[in-house]
Image: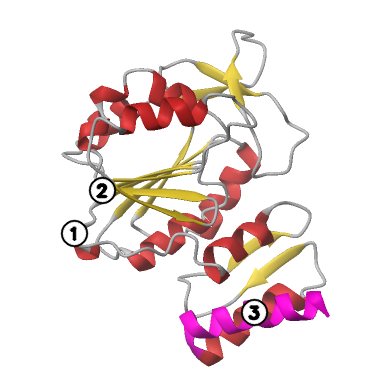
Amino acid sequence: MRNLGIQVIKLISLIRFYKLREGIKIFVGLLFSRNNVYLIRSRVFANNIQLRKDQSDPFIFEQIFCEQQYNFNHPAPNEVKWIIDAGANIGLAAIYFSAKFPNAQIISIEPNKENFELLKLNTINYKNIHCLHAALWYRNEKLDISNKDELSAGFMIEPNIDASKDLIQAITINQIIEEYKLNEISILKLDIEGSEKEIFHNNSNTWLPKCKCVITELHDWLKPGTSSVFFKEMSNFDWVTYVKGENIICLK
């Protein structure tokens, strides 16, 4: 009975946000797929969305599109110009942001190769989503995934100097600002499994003044002290702060 109740809540939520026909279509795609890859077909999306049943993909899809964990009252949604989506996974947050902020350019950064390939595929018809195979970090160096046995949404990165390995290129927020010539970061979304600690601890004063909104998960159970570092740096500015699901949403 409990599982039935959860499914009913999901269906009602999808219908509420995406109307009857499309809500039911998305729900059926999630619930009744027999293949290892779910295929979500809906006019809500610019192309079909692929989710891997044996990874975190369906759970993340439900967080974003059923629970609406990125749905918050932005004071000027049409003025959102640049979104940095770090820890983009397979592109679901970027797709959600593309609909919510139609004038935004979205820079989606994902370190894992398999996730990245699906990110490109899921966003192929979204011309405002720019996909980077990299890891957001506080300095420019080569990185590796330290927990390759985790599900696709739980990968952590660490420095690695072993040149024989297939390593991941790091990219910094300041590099992104320079490369894309950003005057501001309308939204900085971080879901990077603890790396937010290093990013806020090292030189965040050089880019945080440009941020109008920060959305992040904090992973103290992975890296103790993460919350202390985050709130210390954020306290230098005035923010309106919300908690939505697993996310902390801060608006200047």
Image coordinates of residue 157 in percent, x first then y, are 59, 25
191 drawn magenta: no
Residue behind mark 3:
9
Q: Which residue is mark 1?
A: 79
Provide residue 227's location: percent of width, then percent of height.
Answer: 48, 31
Q: Earlier in the sequence, mark 3 or mark 1?
A: 3
Residue name at image x 52 percent, y 38 percent: 218
**102 versus 115 height, above or below:** below
Q: Main secondary structure of the magenta part?
A: helix
Q: Residue furthest left?
A: 183
Q: Position of residue 179 (x, y in %)?
A: 26, 32
Q: Earlier in the sequence, mark 2 or mark 1?
A: 1
Q: Residues within 10 Å of mark 2 (few under 14, many from 20)?
A: many
Which numbered tag is attached to residue 155? none
Q: Earlier in the sequence, mark 2 or mark 3?
A: 3
Q: Which residues are magenta?
A: 1-19
Asked whether the viewer can see residue 86, the reply is yes
Q: CA distance from mark 2 to mark 1?
A: 8 Å
| Image location of residue 4, percent across then percent down | 78, 80
Instruction: Tell me which amino acid carries mark 1.
Output: Glu
Q: Quadrant of residue 33?
A: bottom right
The residue nearer to you, when weighing 219 against 160, is 219
Label 2 secondary element: loop
Query: Disc 2 marks which residue?
Result: 186
Query: What is the C-alpha distance between the residues marked 2 and 3?
Result: 32 Å
Q: Quadrant of the N terminus?
A: bottom right
